[in-house]
């Protein structure tokens, strides 16, 4: 296996297993697992367990905050473990999740639920251009981004010492992470070259001349970058807020910090050195260059899709699925609106559903689904799976807004009660989506896999007016 060839860490010691390194709730981990299962003909019924907050619905906020902080710290890596991270071994762990067979292509790049659905429609694997890890911050504070930078820089230096071909982006965002942002630091490790494990996987497993599709999240965010391989951003696009909302005088920041047990008067964000750089889910230019160079050498064309906002790819992929299903003689009239980790490409395929993926439960992402539905041919049924984020934020959509999304269904309008119970402060596992979708009627056989040329044409046609760039 590829991962066995890169098992040893840079210092000669065995690196940590990928399953221990990659954050359990991170998008890349969930999407690789979901895509691999769908390509094996399985669903996500074994993915995820209820978080510690699932048992604390209705308890006082201080109790919930303390429990969230303890749980985050226990799951995070220690400083010594961060030093043992081997990014090549992580890449090997990702590729080893896919069945050993020849593939007609591959999808690489930024994490996005619709990328998983697109890969499954193409019958190809999806691989991320980076991964997220969480590290312990024993004396942390959710309202001290300056202290988070100091602690994270020291951790990043230890990681970079053994992994010189990555960039480490630190994100301190109490609006999207809540209380855990004061107990841990979040580091997104992005490959600056095509990992050796990926190159070996593509060379060994792709069919001759099979195309590769690279998805790039083009959202930007102000950050501090001193050129040492580690950069820092306070806040993130996934929070549903704007950079100005993380200013110490912003009313929104006050609400966010108080919900997480912090004090806005202590907030001191590090000086910004780059006013608009690609945010944490962007793709390093060296990774793209490495993938293109590899493709040129081995006869595999590389295509690129630049995504200005998550909604653009979600809408274009949903339109693609509807067209694909109808061409196979199916209705394409049943929609499932997924959210965050609540997705299951295998069950979507089995039931012949059209998938629309919301990155998270923020108002912006839910409004994106509403706008797309308002401009689409009506669906006979709409099932909605809102993922509770486990925290409170002024940027979150309320249940009435989710119900409004379900209301677009002509005959069936369903909001999952299990996910809605305790929303937004509880948590539900990925397998909740599987449990719900298993109740959908079967619509097999699945359509024949899409060809890459067809998918690119459909994305170009459906996404042009939303700013999706396909080249």
Image (spheres, grey):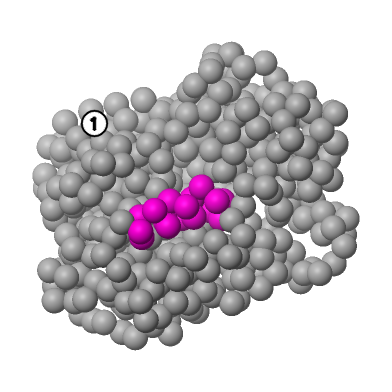
Q: Between residues 329 and 205, which one lies in front from this camera angle? A: 329
Per the image, the residue denoted by label 1 is 292
Q: Residues within 10 Å of mark 1 (few under 14, many from 20)?
A: many
Q: 263 above or below 122?
A: above
Residue 373 lies in the magenta-colored region: yes
Q: Residue at x 50, y 42 (%)?
A: 131
Tell me the SS state at disc 1: helix
Residue 416 locus on image (x, y percent): 54, 75
Q: Between residues 454 and 315, which one lies in front from this camera angle? A: 315
Residue 299 locus on image (x, y percent): 12, 37
Image side of residue 317 versus residue 143, left or right:
left
Image quadrant assignment for residue 67? bottom right
Q: Residue at x 35, y 46 (%)?
A: 312
Whether residue 132 appears in this view of the structure is: no
Whether residue 387 appears in this view of the structure is: yes
For the C terminus, which image quadrant? top left
Image quadrant assignment for residue 329? bottom left
Bounds of the magenta segment:
358-374
Q: Residue at x 15, y 38 (%)?
A: 301
Residue 116 locus on image (x, y percent): 36, 56
Q: Main secondary structure of the magenta part?
A: helix
Residue 404 locus on image (x, y percent): 49, 66
């Amino acid at each position: 296996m590829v991962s066995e060839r890169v098992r040893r860490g840079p210092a000669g010691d065995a690196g940590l297993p990928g399953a221990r390194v990659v954050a359990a709730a991170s998008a890349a981990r969930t999407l690789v697992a979901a895509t691999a299962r769908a390509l094996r003909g399985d669903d996500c019924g074994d993915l995820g367990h209820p978080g510690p907050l699932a048992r604390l619905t209705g308890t006082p906020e201080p109790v919930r905050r303390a429990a969230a902080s303890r749980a985050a710290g226990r799951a995070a890596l220690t400083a010594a473990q961060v030093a043992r991270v081997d990014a090549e071994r992580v890449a090997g762990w990702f590729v080893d999740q896919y069945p050993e067979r020849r593939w007609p292509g591959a999808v690489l790049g930024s994490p996005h639920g619709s990328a998983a659905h697109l890969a499954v429609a193409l019958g190809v694997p999806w691989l991320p251009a980076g991964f997220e890890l969480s590290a312990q911050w024993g004396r942390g504070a959710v309202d001290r981004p300056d202290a988070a930078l100091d602690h994270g820089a020291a951790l990043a230096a230890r990681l970079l010492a053994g992994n010189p071909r990555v960039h480490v982006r630190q994100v301190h965002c109490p609006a999207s992470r809540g209380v855990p942002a004061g107990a841990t630091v979040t580091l997104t490790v992005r490959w600056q070259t095509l990992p050796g494990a990926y190159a070996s996987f593509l060379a060994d497993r792709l069919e001759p001349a099979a195309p590769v599709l690279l998805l790039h999240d083009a959202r930007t965010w102000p950050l501090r970058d001193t050129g040492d391989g580690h950069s820092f951003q306070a806040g993130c696009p996934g929070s549903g807020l704007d950079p100005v909302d993380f200013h110490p005088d912003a009313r929104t920041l006050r609400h966010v910090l108080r919900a997480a047990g912090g004090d806005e008067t202590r907030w001191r964000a590090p000086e910004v050195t780059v006013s608009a750089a690609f945010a944490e889910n962007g793709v390093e230019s060296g990774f793209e260059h490495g993938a293109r160079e590899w493709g040129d050498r081995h006869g595999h064309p590389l295509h690129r899709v630049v995504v200005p906002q998550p909604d653009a790819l979600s809408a274009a992929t949903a339109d693609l699925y509807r067209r694909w299903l109808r061409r196979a003689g199916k209705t394409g009239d049943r929609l499932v609106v997924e959210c965050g980790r609540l997705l299951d490409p295998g069950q979507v395929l089995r039931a012949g559903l059209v998938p629309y993926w919301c990155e998270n439960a923020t108002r912006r992402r839910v409004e994106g689904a509403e706008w797309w539905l308002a401009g689409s041919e009506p669906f006979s049924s709409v099932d909605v799976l809102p993922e509770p984020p486990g925290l409170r934020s002024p940027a979150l959509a309320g249940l009435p807004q989710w119900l409004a999304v379900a209301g677009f269904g002509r005959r069936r309008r369903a909001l999952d009660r299990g996910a809605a119970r305790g929303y937004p402060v509880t948590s539900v596992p990925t397998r909740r989506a599987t449990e719900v979708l298993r109740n959908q009627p079967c619509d097999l056989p699945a359509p024949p896999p899409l060809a890459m040329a067809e998918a690119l044409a459909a994305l170009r046609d459906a996404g042009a007016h939303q700013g999706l760039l396909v080249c």
